[in-house]
Amino acid sequence: MNGLSWLTAQPIAHRGLHDMNHRVWENTLPAFQRAIEHGYAIECDVHLTSDDQLVVFHDDQLDRLTGDKGYIWQRTSAEMQAMRVGTTQDHVPSLAALLDLVDGRVPLVIEAKGIPGHDTGLVARVGEALASYRGPVALMSFDHWLVRDFTRDAPGIPCGLTAWGNEPHQVEAHFAMLAHGINFTSFSITHLPNPFVTFLRERLGMPAISWTIRTPDDVRASLAHADQMTFEGFLPEDSALVS
């Protein structure tokens, strides 16, 4: 699969192996540590702060995960890392802290989260952070303007398109990203099967991972139409549906 067999070798823990934000919250170091202990690959999200640093955080707004007000692009890296996540004592991690923790022990799939007007240099910063990282790692994004920067600003890092939708105009936009050197796709389970994903897998030999798998029906659909799943809310080794 295009030299990316490691990407599909094991299930991928969505934002780490959290427990749906009860005690272990998403995109925290304990969630990533749990994934490592179970031998799962890790999916995570990175944002650019006001001082052009990278933190691991999903939302562009702060309230759901920290209880604070405002946007991530309004805060410095130090301010973000001082924030506690949810009801825990865990703080928002930097990308550097995540890389130090994982240290190549499991594959890492990093999703670059763009905010128009506030993400200039995001891909370049990720590329710099990964230049000396020796573990299996890939970079992906929903945001087409970031995908266009991948091969230039993060050279040598496998890159993918995160996507959803199967309307003709959406599929056309997905296909347009093939001109920008993508190596895989991460596609919504709600829109599989999909002509774009089928073409990548069957005609180009590129892998497709699915998101976000939460139910037995999701597992079955992913097994039928993707090469690996990005999951949350259960342990794949406890599911008879996962081979």
Image (cartoon, rainbow, N blue to C red):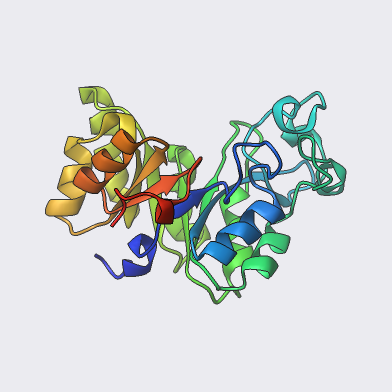
- Any part of residue 176 in sight: yes
Q: State the residue at coordinates (47%, 50%).
A: 235
Asked whether residue 125 is in view, the answer is no
In x, y percent, where is residue 15? 57, 46
Residue 233 drawn at (x, y percent)? 51, 40
Q: Identify the image quadrant of the C terminus.
A: bottom left
**Frontmost residue, 210 versus 61:** 210
Identity of the residue furthest to the left in this view = 203
Q: Residue at x 24, y 27 (%)?
A: 166
Label count reads 0
Q: Is residue 113 above or below residue 44?
A: above
User: What residue is drawn where x is 24% and y is 65%?
Assistant: 1
Q: Viewer-proximal residue, 209 or 238?
A: 238
Residue sitting nearer the eye, 143 or 16: 16
Q: Quadrant of residue 115?
A: top right
Quarter location, residue 2: bottom left
